Image (tube, helix red, strand yellow):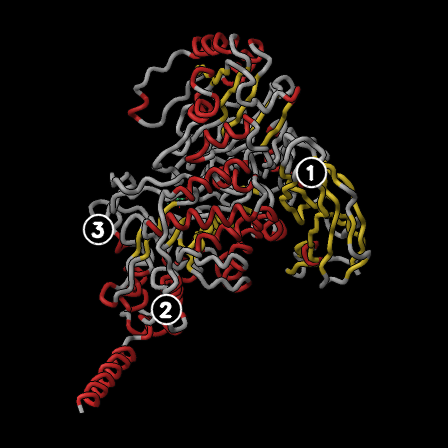
């Protein structure tokens, strides 16, 4: 009897649990399909609550529905680490003590690795940091195309080639989103300069738009399955991109079937009608002083706040328009914060330092190594002179929204001291930049001639001189909000480099920048490296490459012109770049970067895809599996690659395609495949790559569709866009 009672009471408990469970609303049940949860949640949220979800409630967050347990959406920059917490309603740091992050290398460096596996590692690591900090959306990565070397934000993007940036952005996004954190791909689209960025109106052909400026975004959406995207500040064809019918309604949501959230850039919304109708879902950053109307704009006055609500009440806007936005926002929340698969993240872990180091090591590009001056193995020289402000300056700080408060940053000088020993290193500053922060402006800046003289004296007495210069994150350098003023190096560095070279011919120039720079001394300086902004592990990565413990394998993700006028966009004058302050015409059209240099037969200073190694590689002849292909087939390309040098190393091999006789202008060549191949000394491998015939298409403006014309195409294997090894001709039927 007792047993029966216990059995019955057990049944009762189980029954109650089942009841309790079945009473749980669908939207709170993580085992239910997302679309069902969205539908259920939508039916429970009031009109006012829905409108509240469509705009910011603080600098970086938007409301959830507290009453229903639906969390707020917390965004944060991005893309190189997780930005410090700011005050609710101010840009300044909130002085938390637990928000110092790992700084990963800038995205130009990531692109230079030419290694999608490294992009996955990057995304995974930075995503873990975002998750640990409880962010819903990471504001990055950025994939605006490198149109000119003057854009202050090029360092945040992935270079000039739509194919390279597409291949690199997809794994970055996948890595981030594995953490239950949404990536927010930015800035959609054509935000290719900072000058007049909030209104410059871009006039561009459909072909250039589809072939050059959109592919990385399309890959991010369709292959990376990004959960959000950020509209850009500028205008396209007379409409701001944050509420641009063509970009958001027609291309993104209709053609590409994007089901995520369109988030405005901060302050990028200008009109309620357009914001409601033209594809925007979440409005952020419209100028506000907070929750009051104290002379500023309160959050309730945002274009998608009270004006939206009133518009619905008056019948001007529809509830369907509102529901479409809220559906997307809810979908993002269920994919991220309310997902049962959301892991816990981690912050400033040893794994993240290791990832930052690996990305940095793989991205450094060796541009020149005459007399085999490098590597400078440990013990080779007794006295190494380190010169230049960038050897000691923090370059994770500054540059605008991507500025980071870091747990640590190993500067180049610290890295070199750790590698070669304090007793073997002498340092001299060489030049001084202006400082952007008030506190630092008070620092004594010695007149430049005396800095040069001191540096020259230091250089004279050294065995080798390692110079760290380039740009920094000050305004008008590599920085958001302003473009560069000149292609030349700032702060009298050309003069300094020339003086150093006179003092010591063993000169290594390390360029810290996210942009190409003029190098009037290029023929005389024996060794040049492009070292980007490398993040927390900068000094260690540089020391590894300098000492030869790491064999450099980075390749340039953009061309370095000899002079500024050689750049396509700039060669057409002000109308083309930077515009007349209202309009800008992309006159170089599809001929961006190496497409311009190659087609116009202008030699760049350093070509896209170029980078040296301490070893050497021999390329075999390129072959294809067949001679002719149907339009729906895939071309299998192969060739032998051999490490013929004395060191193990990696080579980013590239395959470019061109059409022999086309009915429209086509670039001399376009990157269609690449692979980073690691080979031990003496080892060889057959490299195999695939190219879809469809990827040989151009965008046909008449039919508004991609089209592959039958006929001959040439495929070339190459070590850079300027160093073709062999070619093969195929026929498309
Ligand atoms: C930038 C975005 C950034 C946002 C939030 C804007 O000024 O253009 O890239 O994510 O601010 O900081």
- Looking at the image, residue 683 sits to the left or right of residue 487; the answer is right
Task: Identify the residue at image location x=32%, y=49%.
Answer: 133
Q: Decide which of tag 1 and tag 2 comes sooner along the chain.
A: 2
Residue 346: image location, x then y, percent: 36, 49
Q: Tell me the quadrant of ligand 1.
A: top left
Whether residue 662 can be seen here? yes
Q: Which residue is mark 3?
A: 291
Residue 500: image location, x then y, percent: 54, 12
Q: Which residue is mark 2?
A: 323
Residue 233: image location, x then y, percent: 43, 46
Residue 723: image location, x then y, percent: 72, 36
Q: Of circles 1 and 3, which is in front?
A: 1
Q: Which residue is mark 1?
A: 719
Whether residue 668 can be seen here? no
Number of dots carrying numbers: 3
* Above/below status of 677 relative to 531: below
Task: Classify 10 Å Cα crowding around label 2: few (below 14), some (14-19), many (20 and above).
Answer: some
Task: Identify the residue at image location x=65%, y=38%.
Answer: 680
**620 or 512: which is nearer to us?**
620
**Distance in Å between CA atoms under marks 1 and 3:** 57 Å
Task: Classify 10 Å Cα crowding around label 3: few (below 14), some (14-19), many (20 and above).
Answer: some
**Distance in Å between CA atoms under marks 3 and 2:** 25 Å
């Amino acid at each position: 009897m007792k047993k029966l009672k216990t059995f019955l009471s057990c049944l009762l408990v189980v029954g109650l649990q089942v009841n309790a469970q079945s009473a749980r609303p669908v939207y709170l049940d993580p085992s239910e399909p997302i679309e069902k949860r969205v539908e259920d949640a939508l039916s429970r949220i009031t009109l006012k609550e829905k409108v509240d979800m469509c705009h910011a409630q603080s600098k970086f967050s938007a409301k959830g529905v507290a009453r229903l347990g639906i969390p707020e959406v917390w965004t944060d920059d991005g893309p190189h680490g997780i930005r410090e917490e700011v005050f609710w309603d101010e840009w300044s740091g909130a002085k938390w003590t637990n928000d110092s992050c790992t700084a990963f290398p800038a995205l130009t460096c990531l692109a230079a690795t030419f290694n999608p596996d490294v992009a996955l590692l990057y995304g995974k690591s930075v995503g873990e940091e975002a998750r640990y900090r409880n962010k819903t959306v990471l504001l990055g990565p950025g994939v605006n195309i490198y149109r000119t070397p003057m854009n202050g934000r090029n360092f945040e993007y992935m270079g000039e080639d739509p194919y390279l940036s597409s291949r690199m952005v997809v794994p970055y996004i996948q890595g981030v989103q594995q953490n239950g954190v949404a990536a927010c791909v930015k800035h959609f689209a054509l935000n290719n300069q900072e000058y007049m960025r909030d209104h410059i109106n871009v006039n561009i052909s459909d072909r250039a738009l589809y072939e050059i400026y959109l592919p990385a975004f399309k890959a991010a959406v369709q292959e990376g399955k990004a959960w959000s995207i950020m509209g850009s500040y500028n205008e396209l064809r007379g409409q701001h991109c944050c509420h641009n019918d063509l970009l958001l309604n027609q291309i993104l949501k209709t053609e590409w079937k994007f089901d995520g959230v369109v988030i405005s850039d901060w302050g990028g919304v200008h009109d309620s009608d357009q914001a409601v109708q033209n594809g925007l879902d979440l409005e952020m950053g419209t100028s506000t002083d907070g929750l009051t109307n104290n002379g500023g704009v309160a959050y309730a006055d945002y274009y998608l706040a009270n004006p939206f609500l009133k518009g619905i009440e008056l019948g001007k806007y529809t509830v369907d328009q509102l529901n479409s936005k809220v559906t997307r926002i809810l979908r993002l929340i269920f994919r991220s914060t309310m997902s049962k698969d959301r892991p816990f993240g981690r912050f400033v872990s040893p794994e993240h330092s290791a990832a930052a180091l690996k990305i940095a090591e793989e991205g450094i590009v060796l541009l020149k190594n005459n007399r085999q001056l490098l590597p400078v193995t440990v013990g080779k020289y007794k006295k190494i002179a380190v010169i230049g402000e960038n050897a000691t300056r923090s370059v994770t700080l500054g540059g605008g929204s991507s500025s980071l408060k870091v747990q640590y940053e190993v500067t180049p000088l610290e890295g070199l001291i750790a590698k070669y020993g304090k007793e073997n290193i002498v340092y001299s500053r060489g030049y001084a930049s202006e400082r952007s922060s008030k506190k630092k402006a008070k620092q004594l800046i010695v007149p430049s001639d005396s800095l040069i003289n001191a540096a020259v004296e230091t250089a004279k007495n050294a065995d080798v001189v390692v110079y760290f210069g380039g740009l920094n994150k000050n305004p008008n350098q590599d920085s958001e909000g302003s473009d560069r003023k000149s292609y030349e190096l700032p702060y009298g560095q050309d003069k300094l480099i020339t003086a150093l070279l006179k003092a010591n011919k063993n000169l290594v120039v390390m360029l810290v920048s996210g942009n190409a720079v003029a190098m009037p001394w290029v023929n005389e300086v024996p060794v040049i490296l492009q070292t980007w902004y490398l993040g927390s592990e900068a000094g260690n990565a540089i020391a590894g490459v300098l000492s030869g413990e790491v064999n450099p394998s980075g390749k340039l993700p953009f061309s370095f012109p000899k002079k500024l006028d050689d750049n396509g966009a700039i060669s057409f004058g002000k109308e083309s770049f930077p515009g007349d302050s209202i309009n800008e015409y992309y006159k170089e059209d599809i001929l961006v970067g190496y497409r311009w240099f190659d087609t116009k037969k202008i030699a760049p200073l350093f070509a896209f895809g170029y980078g040296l190694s301490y070893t050497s590689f021999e390329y075999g002849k390129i072959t294809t599996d067949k001679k002719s292909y149907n339009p729906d087939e895939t071309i299998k390309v192969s060739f032998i690659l051999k490490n013929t040098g004395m060191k193990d190393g990696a080579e980013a091999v590239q395959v470019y395609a061109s059409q022999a006789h086309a009915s429209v202008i086509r670039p001399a060549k376009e990157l269609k495949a690449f692979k980073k191949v690691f080979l031990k000394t003496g080892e060889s491998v057959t490299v195999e790559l695939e190219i879809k015939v469809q990827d040989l298409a151009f965008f046909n403006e008449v039919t508004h569709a991609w089209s592959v014309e039958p006929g001959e195409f040439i495929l070339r294997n190459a070590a850079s866009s300027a160093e073709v090894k062999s070619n093969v001709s195929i026929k498309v039927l």
